[in-house]
Amino acid sequence: MKAARYYGNRDIRIERIDAPELRPGAVAIDVAWCGICGTDLHEYLDGPIFCPPQGHPHPISGESAPITLGHEMSGVVAEVGEGVDDLQPGDHVVVEPYIIRDDVDTGPDSRDYHLSDDMNFIGLGGRGGGLSERIVVQRRWVHPVAKHVPLDQAALIEPLAVGVHAVERSGAKAGDLAVVGGAGPIGLLTAAVLKAMGCTVVISELSPLRREKALETGVADHALDPREVDVVDEVRRLSADGRGADVAFECTSVQVVVDTLVDALRPTGVLVIVSIWGSKGEIDFQKVVLKELDVRGTIAYVNNHPETIRLVEAGKIDLSPFITGRIGLDGLVDEGFDTLINRNETAVKILVSPSGEGL
Ligand SMILES: NC(=O)c1ccc[n+]([C@@H]2O[C@H](COP(=O)([O-])OP(=O)(O)OC[C@H]3O[C@@H](n4cnc5c(N)ncnc54)[C@H](O)[C@@H]3O)[C@@H](O)[C@H]2O)c1
Ligand SMILES: [Zn+2]
């Protein structure tokens, strides 16, 4: 089968490899669509980060480069392994792409398996990837999706689950005023979750195209250009008592955005840092103290897939407007990565069809 394999920095090759073999307790999935994520771009430009380099096998997967990429996938069950009796060939599924030690509790009540030692992701740390025609995944990480949800939209359930967990971390509730810094895929999908739960959403974003996307998809009530308007004043003006936003989400990894969000929050507000930081950021502790702010981190998801899937199945979030491109595996680097690295404001999510079907 065809697969996109990460060999190292700026070295991704489309190759023919053996299809993975089915194992007891696992599910063989024919991948329909796999999204390209900012993390994949980071591995390409600045990596290896999550991908174990050659000669340094990952302690859980035991694998090192070359690694099959792709962690935002949807597909159709091809076969089920011995002992799997609740999924059948033909079922539509998505993958919660974790590589986690076998002795960690990943049951439905666990709130922290994603923080366990040596955690990595399928499609970055080994165990195959969605940028290949077939993948075999342990049943625990396979989630069924109703057939009325198109498989292309289902490929966005993984990044949407990041938004669901970020919003869960914030404690936001219906009627809250939320401000989101950055309208990339993560900011937009976090805004979509906030909007679906009945919050008023203000987005601050530099790119006119992305502000337009936020408004046209209805995930933001207001999209501000921080070079044109004073975001803090505007957020205060929009809040019922003039004191600022209830919750804020940092989705840019840009220092000035952190500072703006700290100022835009009302006393006792909650700031969630969603962005990943390559260097140390700062926060004005005096403001945190005097406003009794909560500053919280969020990483990926933990038992958030069922709720995320329900939001999409119930039609509360329409993922179709966030799909801005569809390509085959051969165009991964020259078309997909090139667009997202050099013209990222023109795109939100580019999907890859590893088999070429659906293009
Ligand atoms: N915590 C997690 O689990 C998790 C998961 C996935 C991605 N991430 C991180 O989330 C962040 C966002 O991801 P993305 O894919 O949406 O990235 P992105 O680069 O596509 O989006 C960032 C957006 O911020 C905007 N921006 C930059 N400076 C700004 C400013 N001064 N004011 C307003 N907007 C500004 C950019 O124009 C861009 O649209 C990244 O750091 C990514 O690594 C975190
Ligand atoms: Zn991702």
Image (cartoon, grey):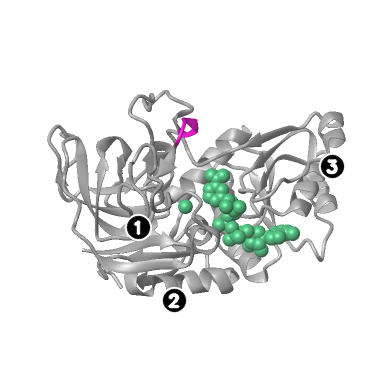
| Neighbour tally class for label 3: few under 14, some 14-19, many 20 plus, Cα within 10 Å | few
Q: Quick check: is 20 in the magenta stretch?
A: no
**SS for tag 3?**
loop
Labels 1 and 3: the sequence-earlier one: 1
Q: Is residue 143 above or below residue 327?
A: above
| Neighbour tally class for label 1: few under 14, some 14-19, many 20 plus, Cα within 10 Å | some
| Foreground disc of the pair 1, 3 | 1
| Foreground disc of the pair 1, 2 | 1
- Residue 263 visible, this angle: yes
In-image side of 43 versus 73 (left or right): right
In the rendered image, residue 289, in percent from the top left (x then y), is placed at 84, 29
- CA gap between label 1 and label 2 equals 19 Å
Q: Which mark is residue 66?
A: 1
Q: Circle 3 is placed at which residue position?
A: 242
In the rendered image, residue 343, in percent from the top left (x then y), is placed at 58, 74
Labels 2 and 3: the sequence-earlier one: 3
Identified at 32% across, 39% down, the residue is 141
Labels 1 and 2: the sequence-earlier one: 1
Identified at 82% across, 66% down, the residue is 228
Q: Quadrant of residue 207?
A: bottom right
Question: What range of the chain is rendered magenta?
Answer: 114-118
In the rendered image, residue 242, in percent from the top left (x then y), is placed at 84, 42
Magenta stretch: dominant SS? loop
Q: Circle 2 is placed at which residue position?
A: 334
Report the quarter where the C terminus lies.
bottom left
Q: Are the residues at dot 1 and dot 2 in contact (C-beta closer than 8 Å)?
A: no
Q: Quadrant of residue 285?
A: top right
* Residue at mark 2: C-beta within 8 A of ligand 1: no
In the rendered image, residue 234, in percent from the top left (x then y), is placed at 81, 53
Q: Amino acid at mark 1?
A: Pro
Camera-nearest residue between 174 and 284: 284
